[in-house]
Amino acid sequence: MIDRPLPTLQAWSDAFHGAEVPVLPVTAAEIQRLAQIEEERGTVDAHTLAEAFAPDPLMTLRVLTHVSHYCTRLNVEPPESLVGALVMQGIGPFFRAFASPAVTDEVLAAVPAARAGLADVVLRARRAAHFAMGFAIRRQDEDAAVIQEAALLHDFAEMLLWCHAPALALTIAQQLEADHTRRSADVQQAVLGITLGELSHHLMHRWQLPDLLLQATEPGQRPQPRAQTVKLAVRIARHTRYGWDDPHAQAALHDDAADVARLLTLSQEAATRLIMAMDS
């Protein structure tokens, strides 16, 4: 566990790069269940695995980074999706590589508040993925699954912070809870010496994560529609984390709906109805 700020961005990147990514308890149970089915019947395929693990952003990250290392050795481009990564790895090698993964509840057994904090981020990521898929389908985007996955993974650095530096993650959460006017990046900089956005970008490049994830986290100029879809989905999930009646959600709704309206070519009112209906 990391219990104090590391001196540089490179030090943070090295620490997370070398640490095992734990998976959610339900994922560990699914791995055991599917391994038994494969041993007895030989009927498990990449789509079966992807469907079982898709709700777990940590498992998705773990598979993508594992296969990325394999692709680097072969000097080939890593796949963009979880299904593609599983196909490239193969079923037998998958079960050998992931037979006994670390589990979040065990890693954070002594820090129940961190388990709750991680659960909040995972729930927010799932909601972002749900919004992203809904927007992508409305746009009839052929890469809807990749867009959904990018939204699910968008905040992976925050999840890793809860797993590997829970005391620091708790400090950030407590400071933000105490003063809702403070920007997350400012608090992260004060507590960690870096921002999680900087760390995620550093790790994305090291792990060769999908280009769409890089584009969706790039600051500055207005992104292309696919990346904008991810950004909007993540933003709406973050603004509504405490429900639609929360003052922060109400204050942000007008601008969020306006951006969704532009993305999907809808009226502001139709966009507002769509967003709220998707979350009902």
Image: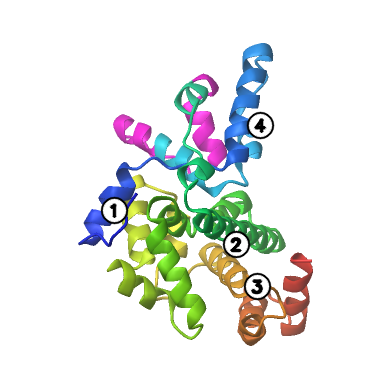
Quadrant hosting residue 71: top left
**Rendered-image quadrant of the C terminus:** bottom right
* Amino acid bearing label 4: Thr
Residue 162 figure quarter:
bottom left
Residue density around tag 3, few if under 14, some if 14–19, many if 20 or more, within 10 Å: few
Q: Are marks 3 and 2 in contact (CB under 8 Å)?
A: no
Which residue has dot 2 on it?
Answer: 124
- Of mark 2 and mark 1, the one earlier in the sequence is 1
Cα gap from disc 3 to disc 2, whole angstroms: 10 Å
Position of 157 relative to 17 (above/below):
below
Q: Which residues are magenta?
A: 68-92
Which residue lies under the disc numbered 4? 48
Q: Is residue 222 visible?
A: no
Tag 4's secondary structure? helix
Mark 3 or 4 closer to N-term? 4
Camera-side mark, 2 or 4:
2
Residue placed under numbered mark 3 in the picture: 242
Q: x, y percentage for residue 250? A: 67, 84
Identity of the amino acid at label 3? Answer: Tyr
